[in-house]
Image (tube, rainbow, N blue to C red):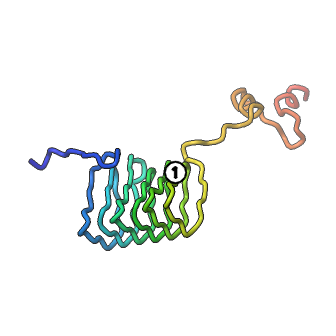
Amino acid sequence: MFGNKKSSQRNGYTIDTLIGPDVVIRGDMDFSGGLYVEGRIEGRVQAIEGKPASLVLAESGSIDGHIQAPVVVINGTVRGDVHAAERVELAQQARVEGDVHYAVVEMNAGAQLTGRLVHSPPKAQRALPAPEQAGEQACGVKKDKAGAKSAMAAAEA
């Protein structure tokens, strides 16, 4: 009976947890999986690090506090900063008072933002070393301050 955990879908997103329209949560919240909010949250909402997570805020929902999750879809009201590591979508009824940090953003006509859009590259993408550095690191050759290769200097001495 209780061991059968089923996920449903709303708006194309898998939903593991639903916060109904008459629910008010006061305090910080950590989650993983799909969180669908139709009610009100007063506090920080944060995805658990290293686990897949998405937050969908319905038109009737509101969050007063900081949001941090890989995927965030907003169609309600947010008073606080939003940090979306992968993607943020501001739907037609979205009302955001705060800065939105994103890797990819989609903003529909009608969405309102009182704050800044701040581009943050995804954490998974890291710059590769320059080709010269990569070859030297692979061969174990390093350059000294004068720019001469230390292996060559040692061989000449």
Residue 38 sits in which quadrant? bottom left
Image position, residue 46 (x, y; %): 40, 60
**Left or right relative to 98: residue 58:** left
Image vertical order of residue 154 relative to residue 56, above or below: above
Outermost residue on the front side: it is 109
Q: Residue at x 39, y 46 (%)?
A: 52
Image position, residue 143 (x, y; %): 82, 37
Residue 138 sits in which quadrant? top right
Image position, residue 27 (x, y; %): 33, 72
Secondary structure under tag 1 reads strand
Q: Nearer the viewer, residue 114 or 151?
A: 114
Q: Residue at x 47, y 57 (%)?
A: 90
Image position, residue 122 (x, y; %): 56, 47
Q: Nearer the viewer, residue 39 or 143?
A: 39
**Left or right relative to 75: residue 26:** left
Q: Nearer the viewer, residue 140 or 102?
A: 102
Q: Amino acid at mark 1?
A: Glu
Residue 31 sits in which quadrant? bottom left
Q: Residue at x 40, y 56 (%)?
A: 47
Category of crowding for the residue at label 1, using alpha-carbon neighbours closer than 10 angstroms: few (below 14), some (14–19), many (at least 20): few
Q: Residue at x 43, y 62 (%)?
A: 93
Q: Which residue is mark 1?
A: 106
